[in-house]
Amino acid sequence: MSLILVADDESHIVQVLALKFRNAGHDVIEANDGEEALDLVREHQPDVVVTDMQMPFMNGIELARAMLGDSTTASIPVLILTARGWAMDECIAMLSNVKSVQSKPFSPREILSLVEGLVDTATPRSECS
Amino acid sequence: MARRFTWDNMILIAMSSACATVLGGLATGIFGFDLMGVAALLGASVVGSLIIYVMMARASTRVADELISRIEDMIENDARVNEFESVRFLDLQDRIAAMHARGREDTASRQVAIARSEEILEVLSMLEGPVVVFDRMGTIRLTNAASDSLFRCSESPTGTGIVQMLEHSTLREQLIDGLSEGALHGRLFDCEHDTKQDGEDSIRQFKASILSLGDSDDGPFVLSLLDLTRENRVSRMKSDFVSKASHELRTPMASIRAYLEMLVDDEITDEDERTKVLRSMLQDTDRLSALVDNMLNISKIEAGMVRPVLERTDLGDISERVLHRLGPAASEKNISLSTSPAPVDLSVEGDAAMLEQVVENLASNAIKYTPEGGRVSIAIDTDPLERTVVVSITDTGLGIPSDVQERVFEKFFRVTSYERMAKGTGLGLNLCRNIVESVHQGRIGVDSRVGEGSRFWFSVPVGFAGARAA
């Protein structure tokens, strides 16, 4: 069981992903924008962050960059969902914590599989090991 | 009048010199070859040359003088000409006629050349794109009016160096390379030119082509520029629109796709959860539908494909209908929704369905972005000076920062602080602006203060509705 943070300003996307992850036995934290997500990441230290690219106040790239700049959150893998397509490949290449970028619409099945793959390859958290 | 230096004179001078040399030779023979002899030779040569030149020149002009005198005599006495004279006169007549013809041809050619150059200048002045003619040394020979904006000087650039005159253009480097390599003919390239105007539009993009008038690299060269600034801007706007529209379409589609997969995989077993998911899918489908409708309506108006049904339309009645329709949504948020039509004729010449959509969009936005317990009021009144009817929708919502108030009417523009409250297509206000301004020649605007609320308003000319009412 892992702790997954889902951040998206589209409540329906958060709702459907949270349902998928919970059905697979994971715990989920929900955030509706980047700032809220960063606060929750720092507070809960999730195993994986699944975030939308375009959100108010702080977008997905800014969130990943802020996490990378903080030693307590730098190693948490990030999966970005985007409806923009190819637009931000260059920015993402510079962020070592962004492990995957998936475009919308997406398959919840595939997202779950990617997230579980990221948890397996990442260093297990002490309380989960 | 100075005598012209002709071949005839040359021959005369040569002949006199030859005769003088003979005389000089004789003098040398008489006086012996010493200093005196040389002086005598030179003096005799010069004096002899002059005497012989004058004699021979007189002899040559005498023929012409005699001919003229003979002709004058014949004209005066109506004399007959002999056969020899007849041939000479005919020959002379032919030669004079030929000279006249040549003169006429020269004059006609000159007139044609002048007319052609005037035509070329006129054609050049009519061309929208800048055209500059310059020589192999890079000196400007000719420009048209459209090229004035390229050069940052008020005086004519003719006679100055094209490289110096285009120092604010990326064209400069191309010209320097081409001139130094002697390979300008047939060059085609993109370039940017800074017109040094305020604002972001100071950079203009061109497609430049250089052709040599002689079809070789000796020039002169014709530089013609095609201004692509507007096309590039339109192209960027289209691409930006497609990108934003694609984002707005993908978002609700993503949640519908994800919910459907969950339903197919039988992962939503709880009945309440199932109902909630189906409701979410319905909302996303409505959002997609509204988005597509708005996109189509805007593009139709922008393309001039909308044929509005202009009729006498009472904006007071429209507001009442909108109030009735949005009542439940306002009640859900405990928002007081009211309308206050002025007690006058509020009719305009307009398309009722379109104007109703404007009032509904503005009022439903006001409800969406006003916190629970707030107020939304619709006021309708006339402006007798402007001969318009003005509809104002005032709310006690979040308010819009002044720096983005004009931008709210742009396609897909969203006020960041609003995004937490509600979702929209990002096209509703743009559609309102198109309906009011493009279809009804009216005006639309917003006055707002952050924390106090907003007042969206639009005015539509009374048109023939006012004429009939009067």
Image (cartoon, coloured by chain):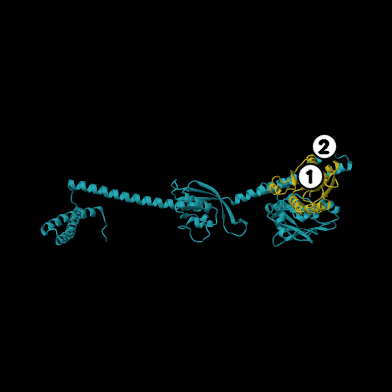
The chain drawn yellow is chain what? A
Residues B379 and B361: in front is B361
Residues B181 and B353: in front is B181
In the rendered image, is residue B356 in sight?
A: no
Residues A25 and B72: in front is A25
Residues indicated by labels 2 and 1 sit on the same polypeptide chain: no
Q: Amino acid at mark 2?
A: Val
> What is the distance, in whole Å, between disc 2 and disc 1 at their CAs?
31 Å
The chain drawn cyan is chain what? B
Count of numbered badges drawn on the protein: 2
Counting from the top left corner in percent of width and height, residue B175 is at: 50, 52
Quarter the C terminus of chain B occupies? bottom right
Q: Helix or strand or loop: what does disc 2 sit on?
A: helix
Residue assigned mark 2: B264
Q: Helix or strand or loop: what does disc 1 sit on?
A: loop
Counting from the top left corner in percent of width and height, residue B202 is at: 59, 57
- The chain ID associated with circle 1 is A
Looking at the image, is A124 positioned above or below residue B375?
A: above
Residue assigned mark 1: A122
Horizontal side of B258 relative to B81 (left or right) equals right
